Amino acid sequence: MVKKTVVIDGKDVELTNLTKMFWPDDNITKADFIDYHAKVAPYILPHLKGRPLVFTRYPDGIHGKSFYQKNIPEYAPDWLNTYESLSDDVKIIRYMLIDDTASLIWAANQASLEFHPWLSTIDSPEYPDFAVFDFDPMEKTDFEDARRLALALRNLLELQGISGYPKTSGATGLQVYVPIEPIYTYEQVRNFVKVFCRALEETFPSMATTERNIKKRQGKIYLDYLQNIKGKTIIAPYSTRPRKGAPVSCPVSWEELEQGANPSMFHLRNMPKRLEQKGDLFRNALLLKQNIDRWIG
């Protein structure tokens, strides 16, 4: 196995198997994948820093076997930061924290094709700083349906003086992030999201559903307010997805959604240039802290 060691911010990062194909149909190698993260590091790191992470790893590329990784592996470098948390079955999980470029490149070398951060940080783990609306297309629905519902949600939020920030999932759906003050419990945030999801369900009964039973969703967009639970994770902005074309979960403007933006437009090859031109459209989502007292009861 060919190895290469690079020094990033004074830390040795070992790179391996750089010629391995990660997206064979698109001729994208592991080296391309690592280079992508080096380029987007200034944009993705603010969305990962201080948040426990779950990785989806594909050691042999998108057509090979994959697995989730919560616990830091024994061979991880000593300089990689971690956060300990108890699981539901009272086991200690040592989550990895990606707080700098060296950590990001190390994770990329582990074939971590997906980054899934918590909705809360280690500074206030019980209190998320985002409320997330997840539009998940079911059978016989598609991104276009999710896009229409997200635009309807924007109107509902704006009527209440609330700002939301949309991003593609990189797969078939999209999410809308509502930045909030980290003073509400996950249950309170979940109930806040549920109120607006139920409003969408009542307004668009043939298109939207909050039904948890998959068989009863009848080909509608699933409004998954249950993503707002401690320990649950959402794909990070600018994270790649293990799908043909190497799509990326991409923050978009509401104007782009109105004009018909779709997930296939945003991928590993063009994301660095987009970021150079437009910057991080989710930057304000990190800075804005909104009050949702009136909806939590």
Image (cartoon, helix red, strand yellow):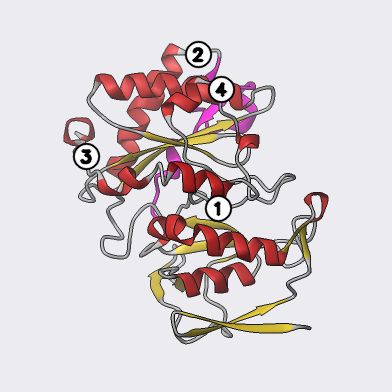
- The mark that comes first in sequence, 1 or 2, is 2
- Marks 1 and 4 sit apart, C-alpha to C-alpha, by 21 Å
User: At label 1, which amino acid type do we have?
Assistant: Ser
List x then y, in percent, for residue 52. 42, 64
Rendered position, 258 above or below 88 = above
- The mark that comes first in sequence, 4 or 3, is 4
| Tag 1 residue | 239
Rendered position, 71 above or below 171 = below
The local crowd at label 4, few if under 14, some if 14 to 19, many if 20 or more residues have their Cα within 10 Å, is few
Answer whether labels 3 and 2 touch (C-beta < 8 Å): no
Rendered-image quadrant of the C terminus: top left
Q: Nearer the viewer, residue 286 or 176?
A: 286
List x then y, in percent, for residue 276. 48, 48
| Residue 45 falls left or right of residue 218 | left
Q: Is residue 8 magenta?
A: no
Give the label, 1 or 3, closer to the camera. Answer: 1
Toward which corner of the image does residue 154 lie, by quadrant? top left
Residue at the image point whose x is 31% and y is 25% from the top: 157
Rendered position, 296 above or below 80 = above
Residue 205: give its label: 2
| Tag 3 residue | 290
Toward which corner of the image does residue 171 lie, by quadrant? top right
- The mark that comes first in sequence, 4 or 2, is 2
- The span picked out in magenta is 207-231
Rendered position, 191 above or below 33 = above
* Element under disc 4: loop
Q: Is residue 221 magenta?
A: yes
